[in-house]
Image (cartoon, rainbow, N blue to C red):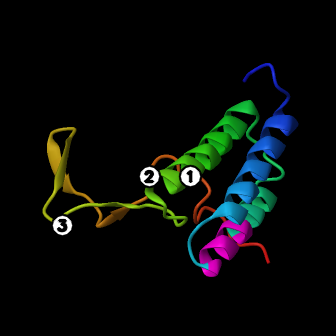
Amino acid sequence: MSGIPSATRVLRLYRRILREGRRWEGPAEEREYIAEEARRLFRQNAVLHGGPEELERKMFEGESRLEIGLHYRIPYPRFAHFDKNTTVSGLGRDRKKPDLVLPAYMDSYGSSPKTQ
């Protein structure tokens, strides 16, 4: 999709998310959540200062959340959970993993304050 202008790609993704939200077969609260979350994150990321790399990260995040939500039929973010006794080997020492970890595709989630 590198030949498609950035604004077109962003608008296409936004429209697809809203369309899937309207067609969502779950409760009305989930449909509302999808629309509100899309609006909030697209507004939050309307001005990116990181250049094309940041835009690609945000597009990857949006596409990933959409596809994962459609696959699992869950509109909410999916976190990675670890057992408290799980350790990570690195640089000669083991460190405990946190109980809750944001997946790599969750770049915007909790990174900046919510806009009203």
Q: What secondary structure prevails in the magenta region?
A: helix
Q: Foreground: 115 or 33?
A: 33
Residue assigned mark 1:
65
Quarter holding residue 72: bottom left
- Could you tell me residue 13's position as x and y percent? 74, 45
Callout 1 crowding tier (Cα within 10 Å): few <14, some 14–19, many ≥20: many
- What's the magenta region? 28-36
Q: Earlier in the sequence, mark 1 or mark 3?
A: 1
Quarter holding residue 80: bottom left
Tell me the residue at 18%/67% (across/down): 84
Of circles 1 and 2, which is in front? 1
- Could you tell me residue 12's position as x and y percent? 79, 42
In the drawing, what numbered circle is on residue 84?
3
Instruction: Check disc 3 and report its element: helix, strand or loop.
Output: loop
Separation of residues labelled 1 and 2 (CA atoms): 10 Å
| Residue type beneath disc 3 | Lys
- Could you tell me residue 56's position as x and y percent? 67, 35
| Residue type beneath disc 1 | Arg
Instruction: Check disc 1 and report its element: helix, strand or loop.
Output: helix
Residue assigned mark 2:
103
User: Residue 5: within the magenta?
Assistant: no
